[in-house]
Image: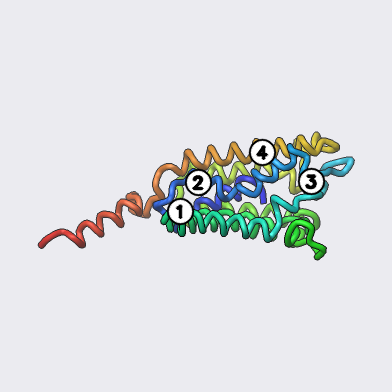
Amino acid sequence: MFAVDHSATALLIKRRFPSVSMTPLLISVQAMELAWVALNYLGVEHTTTEATVQSVADIHLAYIPYSHSVVTATAAAFVVWWILERGLRRRALGRALAIGILSHLILDLATHAPDIALWPGSPYRQLGLGLYSGAPPAAFVVEFLYGVLCWWIYRGGAALLAVIVLGNLANMSFFFAGVPGPEQLLAGHPMLVVTVVFVQIVTMLVLIGLISSKAATTPHGASSYVRTAAIRTRAVRPR
């Protein structure tokens, strides 16, 4: 899944854990991808492309067993949860960030080509439903609808919806081979692919983080957090 919709997942988690700051949520949902960027720059993991890149199907995450494996992602989520909830007694934060880390794995399993190992060095078949490799247009529809769903559940405003919609539309050429776009410049330049992804990650984290800083609003215009606090205040007021 592309950066805009991974970032939108933080909106879902924020809705469930309103006391948790948006910044760590945004980092958690992109932790696996940030690890992938770093490991590619370090030469530990590898990305390749076809001689001509017309869509995401022509970009291959050839070796990603550390940043994107079932065991490493699950272990990372468990460690974060254990430290924060059991060690620091930050229950909501621990659970929210663990969910954020695992969300990236789940969404990538739903969209990636089969390039996700069970664990580093696993001899078993790699996982991924194959939308990117076999049906990029279907992947675009899934990602677009998912991003809008996250916005709707969060009850975001028009500006946040615009970021999600425009962020998806900006990636359209990666999903439709007939739509010209910058992906054609990525052929034979795998590290440029990594850099483009990194720029997208940072851009979406900043935009969604800034715009979602306002509390999710209820249909009556007041934030759900404020409304809940007011109800609790009335409930304990002396009579």
Which tag, 2 or 3, sits closer to the chain's start? 2
Which tag, 3 or 1, sits closer to the chain's start? 3
Residue kind at label 1, given as amino acid type: Leu
Q: Which residue is mark 1?
A: 93
Disc 2 to disc 1: CB gap under 8 Å? yes
Helix, strand or loop at mark 3: loop
Disc 1 to disc 4: CB gap under 8 Å? no
Which tag, 1 or 4, sits closer to the chain's start? 1
Task: Locate the C terminus by quadrant.
Answer: bottom left
Which-is-in-front pick, marks 2 and 4? 2
User: Which residue occupies 68% across, 60% down?
Assistant: 70
Which tag, 2 or 4, sits closer to the chain's start? 2
Q: Which residue is mark 2?
A: 24
Which-is-in-front pick, marks 2 and 3? 2
Q: Is residue 128 visible?
A: no
Give the CA distance from mark 2 to mark 1. 9 Å
Helix, strand or loop at mark 2: helix
Residue kind at label 3, given as amino acid type: Ser
Q: Which residue is mark 3?
A: 55
Within 10 Å of disc 1 (Cα), the crowding (few <14, some 14-19, many 20+) is: many
Give the CA distance from mark 3 to mark 1. 38 Å
Residue kind at label 2, given as amino acid type: Pro
Q: Which residue is mark 4?
A: 198
